[in-house]
Image: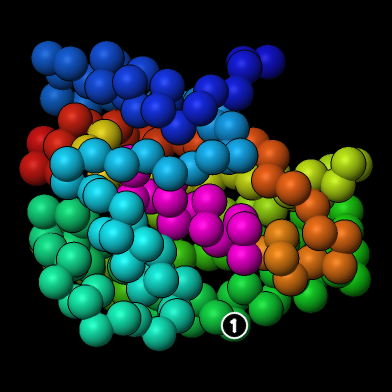
Amino acid sequence: MMAALTPKAVFLRMQEATAGQDTIYNFHCIVRMADFLLETELFPREVLEAYSRKNLGKALHPTDIACFSSQRGGPQGDYSLGMGDKIVNVVDCLNRFPQSKRAVITIANNAYASHTVDSDAKCIREIHFHLHPGPRLDASVFFRAHAVEIFPKNIHFLGTLMTELSERLDCRPHLGDLFLVATQLSSTRMS
């Protein structure tokens, strides 16, 4: 079993893996989610928080709109559609059936997805949540594709999502680990 790494260590590992390469296939790691804030020049804290609010389906602050750009992920990284109901469903599932294998959030592509339309091909595909003794909330996430430069935004969203779930679960679990799989990993969005 591989050891869980901090988000910063995962970010560095991703940068090393993609240095001088177009694409790395089937990248995987375990991320320790206790501290999921990873700021970069592209993603300062206020931008990370704005994207997480948006993707959780929360009300945006007036200043949030200036944070969104195609360089920061564009429509491929918009996971907000139906997210409120998806969160309610996962919370209900884990509260009623703590050992369930059905605590899953699926990020749907457009039903008639075109490979030529960015918004049709979301990067995150599924997130599975697992409760363990302690209690501890772990998750597994499957990315269709992932750009290293976007990692801070995605790990912040996933950590904020896990925190939201943890706060709503009866057992109040602490955040555990995230098993991350990216079928394609590239250094930038445009690779």
Residue 105: image quadrant is bottom right
Which quadrant holds the C terminus?
top left
Dominant secondary structure, magenta: helix
- 157 in magenta: yes
Residue 27: image quadrant is top left
Locate residue 76, reporting x and y percent.
25, 61
Residue shown at the point (62%, 73%) measured from the top left: 87
Q: Which residues are magenta?
A: 151-164
Position of residue 47 relative to residue 79, above or below, is above
Locate residue 185, reporting x and y percent.
29, 32
Position of residue 94 relative to residue 40, above or below, is below
Locate residue 109, reporting x and y percent.
36, 68
Residue closest to the eye, 92 or 156: 156
Residue shown at the point (35%, 28%) measured from the top left: 11
Residue closest to the eye, 64 or 133: 64
Position of residue 4 relative to residue 130, above or below, is above
Which quadrant holds the N terminus?
top right
